[in-house]
Image (cartoon, rainbow, N blue to C red):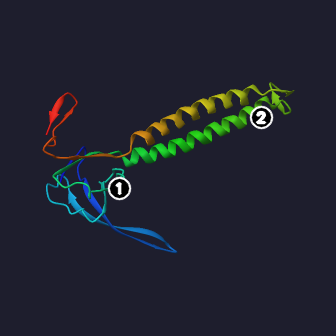
Amino acid sequence: MHIEADRPGVKLLRIDGVISDDEGEAILVRTACVAPCDKVVEGRKGQSFFVGAPGMMPSRGFGLESYHDDLTVHVDGGSMAARQGGYLASALGGVAMAGGGIMLAFGYGGSDSRLSDGKIVEGRNPALTTGGFVAIGAGAAVLATGIVLVATNSTSIELVSATPRSAGVRFEGGRVVF
């Protein structure tokens, strides 16, 4: 097996078991090899593997039982910090939009009395409606940013078997990669 990764410290990890009790669950994981690896990894017994690295989102699990020849794992790692920031931004954007909606409801409600320029005024509150629209717009922008961060920061892998037909050669970005 050979591992090609876009970040340092990528490991091929094997799941050896799962422990579960009333306190929670744990996964027993062992390092099968560290990139670039270049060694034989036993996977014919149906073991589950995934790749991980410090600061990188772990990949989805995969098996090796259907691969019998040399195998290359291409890893495109997503940032864990960016993905977590995306979740936070999505939550904050949603809260800002909800707050803006509440501000609009009260601003257009028209049943409130307020002091404006030394006079008591009833009816629509332009300060609340303007603030509501601003909060909804800003919240939507933050929410959209969060969604993009979550969607684009997952780790993807590609397993390429070096068979006599492909020999592990592929065309990528306008060049031939071995």
Disc 1/disc 2 C-alpha distance (Å): 49 Å
**Occupied quadrant, residue 156:** top left
Side (left or right) of 2 relative to 15: left
Q: Which residue is mark 2?
A: 106
Residue 40: x and y, percent?
Answer: 15, 60
In which quadrant of the rendered image does the N terminus lie? bottom left
Residue 131: x and y, percent?
Answer: 67, 30
Is disc 2 placed on a helix, strand or loop? helix
Residue 73: x and y, percent?
Answer: 23, 49
Residue placed at 29% from the left, 54% from the top?
A: 51
Which of the two discs, 1 and 2, sits closer to the camera? 1
Query: From what the image shows, is residue 148 above or below residue 156?
Result: above
In which quadrant of the rendered image does the C terminus lie? top left
Side (left or right) of 164 relative to 97: left
**Occupied quadrant, residue 64:** bottom left
Amino acid type at circle 1 is: Gly
Density class for disc 2 (Cα within 10 Å; few <14, some 14-19, many ≥20) is some
Query: From what the image shows, is residue 109 above or below residue 8?
Result: above
Q: How many marks?
A: 2
Is disc 1 placed on a helix, strand or loop? loop
Q: Which residue is mark 1?
A: 61
Side (left or right) of 149 relative to 16: right
